[in-house]
Amino acid sequence: MKRKILALTLVLTLALLLAACAQSAPAEQPAAQPAPAQEEQPAVSGDVQPASEIVVYNWSEYIDPDIYSQFTDATGISVIEDNFSSNEEMLAKLQGGAAGYALTVPSDYTVAIMIEEGMLSPLDHANVPNLANLGERFRNLPYDPGNQYCVPYQWGTTGLGYDSAVIDEPASYAAIFEPDPNSAWYGRTTMLDDPRESFAAALVYLGYDINTTDEGQLEEAKQALIRAREGLAGFDSDTFEDLVASGENVMAHGWNGDFLVVQEENEDVAYVVPEEGGVVWVDNICIPASASPEQKLAAEMFINYLLEAEVGAQLSEYNYYASPNAASEELLDPEFLEDPTVYPPAEVLEKLQYIRPVGEAESLFQRLWDEVKTAS
Ligand code: N2P
């Protein structure tokens, strides 16, 4: 069937893309463990009993709240959610010693940073038998081979959302980086409040690698962002899609699924990856090293619950992001599975890159980003 061939092509393209990021793989990881397929119930390790309550540190509007209550009904464990707006905000909070979180949801490059800094607790696969449902290509990602620490949560792309009833498709990032006071989107556009994402947009626009650590190129990108600011209503990672749907703004730099969600409210909202390309990412659910054994066990039970075929499908039906859960895919609407906004066609995928950890230059990105935001 045509659909199957298309799906296979996408799988292969994504696998290639992921393989291309292999240089960010932490060295000397043991080989992947095959996921145990038989067990139905998570094994309770030793005398440890699961915590009666867990706090999940997640991006906003990234999970159907019913999933939490269903999990509570199934296990008796209640769930509280706290939100962050960027990987860097989450990282800074955990590095600052914030404890009490049983789960957090870093993107690919941030998983690599957190593993390297000893900030994550390795998963006990015996407690996560539903790992067997995870798609093959999500089992050996370069930043966490063998899912030793994390389980891929959802994946997506970063581009431009816009109100197609008001403006034409913004085919290029020039719409942002060459602000024109006469354009309909001047003053009615936002960019992500996110150092690596917004620098990635500026860097691809300038024709540079999004992971460059060249100070001259980064300085140029900073100047481009400062110029872009003239035409921006602000930097926003939490409500950008709502502001386009409500008509307050007409364009936003943001994540694909968020724009798809608000199409229910305003069907004119559309999304495009500009011709220069952009970012593809995989978010992951992981347990901070600061979790107690009881919290860790409850967190593993939650991860296992998310990996149920029906729950994974429910997650994608809520947040409109692509699922790494192969068993869930069978339950998803074929229209969703064929949506090029969710599953980019090969010619778009090849223009997308992963953000990678840049080591010591991480603080340079942060300093330049602060300068963008405070420039007058
Ligand atoms: C959901 C945010 C998507 C996370 N609102 C982007 N990594």
Image (cartoon, grey):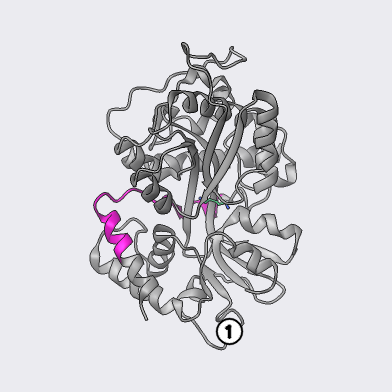
Whether residue 292 sits left or right of residue 256 in the image: it is left
> Which of the two residues, 38 or 270, is positioned nearer the viewer here?
38
> Residue 18 location in percent, x, y?
44, 41
Q: Residue at x 45, y 37 (%)?
A: 100
**Secondary structure category for the residue under label 1:** loop
- Which quadrant is home to the N terminus? top right
The residue sitting at the front extreme is 52
Q: Residue at x 45, y 41 (%)?
A: 16
How many marks do you count on the picture? 1
Type of the residue with mark 1:
Ser
Tell me the magenta residue range. Answer: 346-367
Q: Residue at x 48, y 24 (%)?
A: 294
Residue 111 painted magenta: no
Whether residue 42 sits left or right of residue 110 in the image: it is right
Is residue 269 shown to the viewer in this render? yes
> Residue 263 location in percent, x, y?
72, 59
Is residue 329 shown to the viewer in this render? no
Residue 363 painted magenta: yes
> Residue 342 location in percent, x, y?
62, 50
Q: Quadrant of residue 76?
A: top right
The residue sitting at the bottom extreme is 182
> Which of the two residues, 108 or 43, is positioned nearer the viewer here?
43
Whether residue 333 sits left or right of residue 119 in the image: it is right
- Which quadrant is home to the C terminus? bottom left
Residue 282 higher or lower than 365, as above or below: above
Residue that badge 1 annotates: 183
Q: Quadrant of residue 250?
A: bottom right
> Residue 90 location in percent, x, y?
43, 49
